[in-house]
């Protein structure tokens, strides 16, 4: 009888464990969606996919992240709002596109020639008093947390109209305007600007609605824009950074060990993306030349004229988009 009771107790214990264990396992499973507007061929999309896959792998599937490129979920201007509201857990955010509407002083990031590297630009926002204030304001108002740096590349000018030999060559071009901070430059150059989202650029180039764009080199290849672009001009104007941002409420709800995995992977893949984006851009430019493209590197009198125009007219006009103390703080930081 005693043996029978023990046997019954063992079976009952096993039964209850089988009933409870699956529920426990389900409770520890987490899923998240990462929204990106980039083409799957774009370096930022490639690194986003690496991030998603590595988090899933290191967590042994406890946190499964699915990446949705090509604005399957949200477009370039919509994704930050989706992260803020919790409509998506993670989003690929292009800072110069999304952040100035929250804090206009983020426009220092697209101020031509201000920062000479991604590291310097990031240092301003993470280390300086003014920069940290701007960044904190943005993340607080957007209920977001930085997970990973995912740069899209330094920006330069491309055209299908004519060789970009200097300032005069810009006159009359039909230029795509993505950022408000681009307006002063196109206006000073006497170009005709057309506001277009990324998804409409290819058709606009194809039909002649526009013939000129400011873009990182990688984008002209990833989106096949180079089919209608034959000319380019250096120097680079600014370093366009992008970020994988998480909805902070969602991130804080994760167990500590999963939070650590997300941050560790974000740091590692972010370092890799930063180290490779410049080389990837130069590789694209070599391919551009192999396709017959002509790259003009401004020098001599043309570079002097370009720099003077930027200093005397473009920068003062852009300064109206940024508080004076914020601009001075950024300039002082960059001059160190």
Image (cartoon, helix red, strand yellow):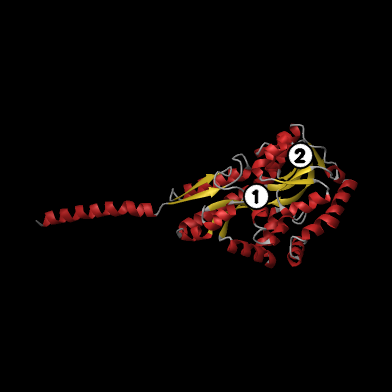
Q: Is residue 225 left or right of residue 317?
A: left
Q: Is residue 131 left or right of residue 80?
A: right
Q: Residue at x 58, y 44 (%)?
A: 71
The 10 Å Cα crowd at callout 2, few under 14, some 14 to 19, many 20 or more, is many
Reading the image, the residue beneath label 2 is: 211
Residue depth check, mark 2 versus mark 1: number of the one nearer the observer? 2
- What residue sits right under mark 1 in the picture? 151
User: Compared to 195, does 295 lie above or below?
Assistant: above
Q: Nearer the viewer, residue 18 or 143?
A: 143
Question: What is the secondary structure assignment of the residue under circle 1?
Answer: loop
Residue found farthest to the left: 1
Element under label 2? loop
Q: Quadrant of the N terminus?
A: bottom left
| Marking on residue 124 | none
Residue 80 appears left or right of 62: right
In the rendering, at what x and y percent does residue 333 appear? 74, 63
- In this view of the protein, which residue sits in the foreground, 193 or 254? 193
Residue 64: x, y in percent? 46, 48
Left/right placement of residue 16 relative to residue 231 reads: left
Is any atom of residue 212 visible in this view? yes
At horizontal 62% and vertical 46% (from top left) the residue drawn is 44
Give the quarter of the image for residue 43.
Answer: top right
Find residue 108 and report its image quarter: bottom right
Residue farthest to the top? 291
Q: CA distance from mark 2 to mark 1?
A: 25 Å
Dot 1, how many residues are within 10 Å of its Cα: few (below 14), some (14-19), or many (20+)? many
Q: Position of residue 85 (x, y in %)?
A: 53, 57
């Amino acid at each position: 009888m005693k043996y029978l009771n023990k046997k019954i107790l063992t079976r009952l214990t096993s039964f209850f464990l089988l009933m409870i264990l699956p529920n426990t396992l389900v409770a520890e499973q987490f899923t998240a969606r990462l929204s990106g507007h980039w083409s799957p061929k774009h370096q930022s999309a490639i690194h986003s996919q690496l991030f998603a896959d590595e988090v899933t792998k290191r967590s042994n599937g406890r946190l499964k992240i699915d990446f949705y490129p090509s604005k399957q979920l949200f477009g370039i201007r919509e994704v930050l709002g989706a992260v803020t509201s919790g409509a998506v857990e993670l989003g690929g955010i292009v800072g110069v596109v999304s952040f100035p509407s929250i804090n206009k002083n983020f426009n220092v990031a697209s101020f031509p020639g201000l920062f000479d590297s991604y590291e310097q630009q990031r240092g301003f926002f993470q280390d300086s008093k003014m920069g940290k204030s701007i960044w904190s304001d943005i993340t607080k108002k957007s209920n977001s947390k930085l997970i990973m740096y995912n740069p899209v590349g330094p920006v330069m000018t491309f055209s299908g109209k004519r060789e970009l030999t200097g300032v005069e060559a810009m006159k009359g071009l039909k230029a795509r305007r993505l950022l408000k901070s681009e307006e002063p430059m196109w206006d000073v150059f006497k170009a005709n600007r057309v506001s277009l989202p990324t998804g409409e650029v290819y058709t606009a180039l194809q039909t002649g609605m526009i013939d000129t764009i400011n873009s990182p080199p990688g984008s002209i290849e990833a989106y096949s824009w180079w089919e209608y672009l034959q000319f380019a001009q250096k120097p680079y104007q600014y370093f366009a950074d992008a970020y994988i941002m998480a909805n902070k409420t969602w991130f804080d709800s994760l167990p500590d060990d999963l939070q650590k995995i997300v941050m560790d992977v974000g740091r590692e893949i972010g370092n890799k993306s930063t180290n490779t984006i410049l080389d990837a851009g130069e590789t694209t430019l070599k391919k551009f030349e192999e396709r017959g493209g002509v790259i003009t590197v401004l020098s001599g009198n043309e570079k002097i004229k370009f720099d003077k125009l930027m200093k005397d007219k473009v920068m003062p006009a852009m300064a109206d988009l940024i508080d004076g103390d914020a601009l001075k703080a950024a300039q002082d930081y960059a001059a160190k």
